[in-house]
Image (cartoon, helix red, strand yellow):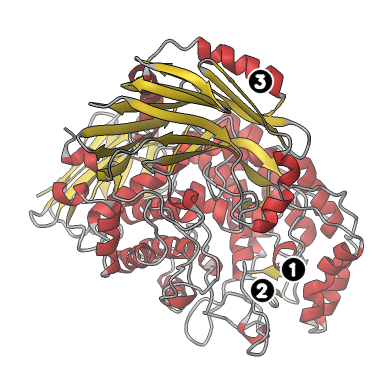
């Protein structure tokens, strides 16, 4: 029997996957960072979607023509106020040369199909996901018999393990591996040639499946059936199980291979497995749990609330407030999805994770003007920073293309990273101004490199990986930036993703998708540059970089112009006066200095901080998306407003969350809480964004400041966080406002010096440290202390 504490890690559903024609959207996901499995949960005709992280198709990589000559022309047009012409200048030059690089898309590898005889209508149906182990269970009653199917994707043995059990009746089931059809008739026609390459073999306890990808390489899987009793025999292109009380199904998929060779190899690997289901699960759960259970969170939900199904929790949310149990589960679910779709030696998690069920899904690539960053924000504080190595592997592997981009698009040294990339494709691919004219991706990604160092103290990584990347990003700016009349930098073309200035919007009735995004001096562009240079200077001093380099970066930093406010008192999204703010938009790019950056704080510049707070408050709610609401929640946490932060999560929960708790880009029900869009694509960045936002509400971390409970709303009156991270160590704390109690422990893994800010909700703090720690109250500030800690030492805080 699971305890109430355990239940916060269980997602329970009373329905099978039910999204019409796209059941994969509503499936329960499992994965090991390489293999993904999606369990639909049907009783009679079950489907398990199988995916592989390395299986992509339909990409095209053209030779990028040299159009660097367009930059002076674009700037001349902008200087003359011919902004629309300038907007399209680079794009038109590429199109005229026939350039047509296209990003690849993930390929659904196979369907595992299971058909079982139904005697009577099902009763007591449940499907559950245990996030702490990665196991999915589907159970029901048929007459007097109890059936259960359980599945996980092993991190230890790199396979899918699936067991079918019955307590009173013998199992009669047919297993098959098949080609996943598309839900789009257009793609089904395009896939007809691939269907002709399908091959299957059924032999004793083995079932083999393969198809050929567009490049001629094969992909597929080998399945093995192990029975406790009864018999298994070939039936058509499948395996029929008869008179068994328990069947174990083991599946190993392959990608980018050769069917004969891989079938033989995988049969041998499956034949060598002697462990039963429980032993395999134990081996996997040890590795999965080491990651997932490295941090924990309770927001005081009751045991009864944690027992409720997803459907019930969502109905409660629809009334207005997301229950504490749902937010606990959402925090854990983001971690679960990230762990299940990421491994250090693999590619980073894409927007659909390892669970996309069609062949050309909307926005299925790596998008670096918000989305892939959001998917990694939570990792350092959540104790999962090691998994961000997947992010670095992807972008480091495309550096030659990024250098080529900088030279041929803009005539600059260094790197230009297009917003969209996929494995092996780092050239410009979305040939539209809103993407091509934005140069901030490399600088934004650079913060993740430096943050990895801050949370690990890995000087080898800083010297050999982070610094080279940051240097290349800065080299681009050195060539790209120009001076204004005052000797400050001017940046153009400049884009605030993906917004168009209000005075450059088309007349009503004209198309509204990114009509004229190309501007001058977008606030975000300068915020990214300022952060990059600040980190470079600090990193250069840490590793003993050439003094001339550090001095050059310092000169660049001094030439960045100050941020500007508008007539509403809000920070302007574009600093140049020719471009008016437009509040009716989902991106919150100009809030970068507050979040995800740490440049502007209330303590250092209260007037400017207030201007950022006004700016986010002016964003229209009806223009938001699932991911932008997660972003907004994190911004409000940085602003210290727990009530507004949790309100953003409430809005997300009642607009862009579906039964399996996947987040969608927008509300498909047209309720006015998000932007209107005919499609409502899955976008798991918001799942991970909620995880980060909750962490931001509980803990603010910078290299110099640790603030506990900066934005906890009133309704989270008690709770506990354990295993969270500050840069040099771990922090755990618990609180109960009703009883006036607060306790915290900080343990240093490396030498640490920082200012500790404690919640002012409590008083009479007692702060005590072991030998090797020092504590000094900050003059004229309440609940603020200067802390120095040696490695291995613990600081304890208590308020009563």
Which of the labelled discs sits on residue 514, or is there none? 2
Q: Earlier in the sequence, mark 1 or mark 3?
A: 3
Q: Nearer the viewer, residue 701 or 319?
A: 319
Q: Which residue is mark 1?
A: 433
Q: Is residue 474 above or below residue 386?
A: below
Which structural element holds mark 2?
A: loop
Label 1–label 2 contact, CB within 8 A: yes
Quadrant occupied by the N terminus: top left
Residue 794, x across and y down, in percent: 26, 33
Mark toward the viewer: 3 or 2: 3
Q: Nearer the viewer, residue 735 or 46?
A: 46
Residue 485 is left or right of residue 223, and the answer is right
Q: Nearer the viewer, residue 629 or 711?
A: 629
Q: Is residue 326 above or below residue 282?
A: below
Callout 2 crowding tier (Cα within 10 Å): few <14, some 14–19, many ≥20 = some
Q: How far is disc 1 from disc 3 in space, using C-alphas?
A: 44 Å
Callout 3 crowding tier (Cα within 10 Å): few <14, some 14–19, many ≥20 = many
Which residue is drawn at the image coordinates 37% and 40% (left, top)?
725
Which structural element holds mark 3?
A: helix
Quadrant hosting residue 391? top right
Which structural element holds mark 1?
A: helix
Which residue is drawn at the image coordinates 24% and 52% (left, top)?
325
Q: How far is disc 1 from disc 2 in space, using C-alphas?
A: 8 Å
Residue 599 is left or right of residue 465, and the answer is left
Which residue is drawn at the image coordinates 55% and 43% (left, top)?
349
Q: Earlier in the sequence, mark 1 or mark 2?
A: 1
Q: How far is disc 3 from disc 2 in space, using C-alphas?
A: 46 Å
Which of the labelled discs sits on residue 262, or is there none? 3
Q: Is residue 363 above or below residue 789?
A: below
Residue 201, x across and y down, in percent: 62, 22
Can residue 758 be seen from the camera position used here? no
Residue 790, x across and y down, in percent: 35, 30
């Amino acid at each position: 029997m699971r305890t109430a504490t355990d239940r916060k890690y269980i997602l329970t559903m009373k329905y099978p996957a039910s999204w019409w024609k796209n059941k994969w959207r509503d499936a329960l996901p499992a994965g090991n960072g390489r293999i993904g499995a999606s369990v639909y949960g049907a009783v009679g005709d079950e489907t398990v979607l199988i995916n592989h992280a390395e299986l992509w198709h339909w990409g095209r990589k053209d030779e990028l023509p040299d159009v660097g000559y367009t930059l002076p022309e674009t700037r001349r047009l902008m200087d003359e106020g011919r902004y629309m012409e300038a907007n399209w200048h680079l794009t038109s030059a590429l199109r005229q040369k026939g350039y047509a690089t296209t990003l690849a898309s993930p390929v659904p590898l196979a369907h595992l199909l299971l058909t079982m005889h139904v005697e009577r209508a099902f009763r007591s149906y449940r499907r559950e996901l245990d996030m702490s182990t990665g196991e999915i269970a589907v159970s029901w009653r048929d007459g007097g018999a109890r059936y259960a199917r359980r599945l996980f994707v092993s991190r230890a043995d790199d396979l899918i393990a699936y067991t079918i059990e019955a307590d009173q009746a013998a199992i009669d089931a047919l297993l098959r591996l098949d080609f996943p059809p598309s839900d789009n008739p257009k793609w089904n026609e395009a896939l007809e040639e691939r269907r002709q390459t399908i091959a299957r073999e059924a032999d004793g306890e083995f079932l083999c499946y393969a198809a050929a990808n567009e490049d001629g390489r094969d992909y597929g899987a080998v399945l093995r059936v192990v029975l406790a009793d009864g018999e298994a025999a070939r039936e058509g292109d499948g395996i029929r199980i008869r008179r068994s009380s328990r069947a174990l199904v083991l599946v190993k998929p392959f990608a980018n291979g050769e069917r004969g060779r891989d079938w033989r190899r995988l049969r041998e690997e499956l034949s060598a497995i002697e462990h039963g289901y429980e032993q395999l699960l134990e081996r996997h759960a040890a590795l999965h749990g080491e990651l997932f259970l490295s941090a924990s969170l309770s927001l005081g939900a009751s045991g009864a609330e944690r027992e409720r199904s997803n459907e019930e929790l969502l109905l409660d949310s629809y009334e207005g407030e997301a229950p504490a149990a749902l937010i606990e589960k959402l925090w854990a679910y983001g971690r679960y999805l990230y762990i299940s779709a990421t491994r250090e030696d693999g590619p980073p998690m894409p927007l659909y994770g390892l669970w996309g069920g069609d062949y050309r899904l909307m926005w299925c690539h790596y998008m670096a003007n918000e989305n892939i960053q959001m998917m990694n924000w939570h990792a350092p504080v959540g104790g999962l920073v090691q998994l961000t190595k997947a992010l670095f592997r992807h972008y480091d592997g495309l550096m030659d293309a990024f250098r080529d981009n900088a030279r041929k698009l803009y005539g600059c040294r260094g790197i230009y990273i297009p917003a969209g990339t996929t494995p092996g494709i780092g050239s410009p691919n979305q040939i539209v101004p809103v993407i091509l004219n934005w140069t901030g991706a490399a600088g934004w990604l650079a913060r993740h490199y430096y943050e990895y160092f801050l949370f690990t103290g890995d000087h080898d990584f800083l010297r050999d990986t982070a610094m080279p990347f940051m240097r290349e990003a800065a080299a681009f700016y050195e060539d790209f930036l120009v001076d204004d009349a005052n000797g400050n930098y001017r940046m153009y073309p400049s884009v605030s993703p993906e917004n168009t200035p209000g005075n450059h919007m088309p007349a009503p009735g004209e198309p509204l998708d990114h009509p004229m995004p190309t501007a001058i001096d977008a606030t975000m562009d300068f915020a990214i540059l300022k952060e990059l240079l600040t980190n470079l200077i600090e990193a250069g001093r840490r590793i003993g970089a050439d003094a001339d380099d550090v001095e050059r970066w310092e000169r660049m930093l001094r030439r960045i112009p100050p941020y500007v406010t508008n007539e509403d008192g809000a920070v302007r999204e574009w600093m140049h006066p020719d471009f008016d703010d437009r509040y009716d938009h989902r991106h919150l790019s100009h809030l970068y200095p507050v979040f995800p950056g740490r440049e502007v704080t209330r303590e250092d510049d209260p007037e400017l901080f207030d201007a950022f707070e006004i700016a986010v408050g002016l964003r229209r709610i009806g223009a938001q998306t699932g991911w932008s609401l997660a972003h907004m929640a994190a911004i409000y946490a940085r602003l210290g407003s727990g009530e507004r932060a949790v309100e953003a999560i409430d809005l997300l929960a009642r607009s862009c969350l579906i039964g399996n708790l996947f987040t969608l880009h927008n509300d498909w029900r047209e309720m006015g809480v998000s932007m209107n869009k005919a499609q409502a694509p899955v976008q798991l960045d918001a799942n991970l964004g909620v995880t980060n936002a909750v962490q931001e509400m509980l803990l603010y971390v910078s290299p110099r400041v640790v603030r506990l409970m900066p934005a906890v709303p009133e309704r989270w009156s008690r709770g506990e966080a354990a295993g969270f991270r500050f840069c040099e160590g771990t922090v755990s704390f618990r609180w109960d406002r009703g009883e006036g109690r607060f306790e915290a422990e900080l343990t240093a893994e490396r030498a640490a010096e920082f200012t500790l800010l404690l919640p002012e909700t409590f008083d009479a703090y007692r702060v005590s440290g072991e030998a090797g720690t020092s504590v000094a109250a900050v003059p004229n500030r309440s609940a603020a202390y200067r802390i120095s800690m040696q490695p291995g030492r613990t600081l304890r805080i208590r308020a009563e």
